[in-house]
Image (cartoon, coloured by chain):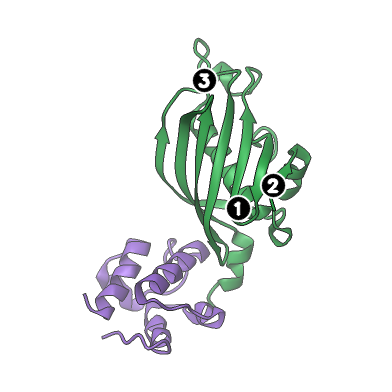
Chain colours: A green, B purple
Amino acid sequence: MEKSLDINAIIKHQRNRYPVLLIDKITHLVPENSAIGIKCFTYNEWFFPGHFDDEPNVPGFIQIESLVQTFIMTFLCKKEYCGLKTNFVSINNIKFKRKIVPGDVMEIRATLKSFKRGVAIGRSESFVDGEPACSADFIVAVPQILDQFKPKA
Amino acid sequence: MDNLELYKKAFIDTFMVEESDLPALKYQAIPAWDSVGHMGLMALLEEIFKVELDIDDIIEFSSYETGILILKKYNVVLG
C-alpha cells in the first residue's frame, strides 16, 4: 500500500532535526521497498550564503544527506523501526550531474534492496525538473538492532 | 581458491588486516571489528559460503578461530 508522509510524520519516524532535516515530504512510500521524497531549496537555507556568496548552490554533502534521509524512510516507516537512529556504513558510486540552486525542487527516488539484521542496502537518485541531479548507493546501519547480534565478549 | 582461502579473504577484505593477523583476531580487538564490521563479515561469509547463520551462531562468532568451528556446523569445512 503506498503512503505519503508530511513533515510531522517524517519527524515522528526519523531522528534528524533542524538544521539537518533535509527532506520536506514523502510523496510515495512502499514500506521496505521504496520511497519518493521532496526537498525544496529556498535561498533562506543556512548553507547558501557560504556556498557561495556570489553563486549560491547546494553543497554535495547536503544533497547526499537528502538522498539518504529519503532512503532511510523506506524502513523507518515501519512501526518496529520508528524513531531509531541510523548511521552510514558506506556511500558508493556517487554522481553529481547538475548544480542545484535556490528555487529548485529536488525529487528523490529511493530503493531499498535489502534490510537484514539492522543493515540496509539500497540506492537513491534525485532529479530537478526531471533531469538527473545526484545519485548514490548506500549501506546504512541501525545500531540498536545491530547490538542484538554483538558477539559475547 | 579453497574454502580456507575464501574465509581468510573475507576477514582481510572486511577488516583490512594482514593474513598474519588472522589467527589471533577477535571481536573488538581491532577498531574495524565492531558491531557494524561484525555484521558486514557475517553477510559476506553467508554470501561466499551460501549459508544463513543462526542468530546464536552470529553471537558466538567472536573470533577467527571460533568462526572455523561454527562454519563446520553448516558443512563448510575450512582447511
Counting residues from the N terminus, which is met first, the one under dot 3 or under dot 1? 3
Please, what secondary structure does the residue beneath circle 3 have? loop
Q: Disc 2 marks which residue?
A: A15
Position of residue B34 in the picture relative to residue A105 (left or right): left
Residue A75 vs residue B4, the one in the foreground: A75
Checking the image for residue A57, the label placed there is 3
Q: Chain of mark 2?
A: A
Task: Compute the Cα span from label 2 to label 1.
Answer: 8 Å
Q: Quadrant of residue B8?
A: bottom left
Q: Amino acid at mark 2?
A: Arg
Q: Quadrant of residue B29?
A: bottom left
Checking the image for residue A86, the label placed there is 1
Q: Chain of mark 3?
A: A
Q: Badge 2: few (under 14), some or many (20 or more) residues near its Cα, within 10 Å?
A: some
Q: Residue furthest top?
A: A54
Please, what secondary structure does the residue beneath circle 1 have? loop
Same chain under badges 2 and 3? The reply is yes
At which x and y percent is residue B48? Answer: 35, 72
Q: Badge 3: few (under 14), some or many (20 or more) residues near its Cα, within 10 Å?
A: many
Q: Amino acid at mark 3?
A: Asn
Confirm or deny contact between disc 2 and disc 1 (CB under 8 A). yes
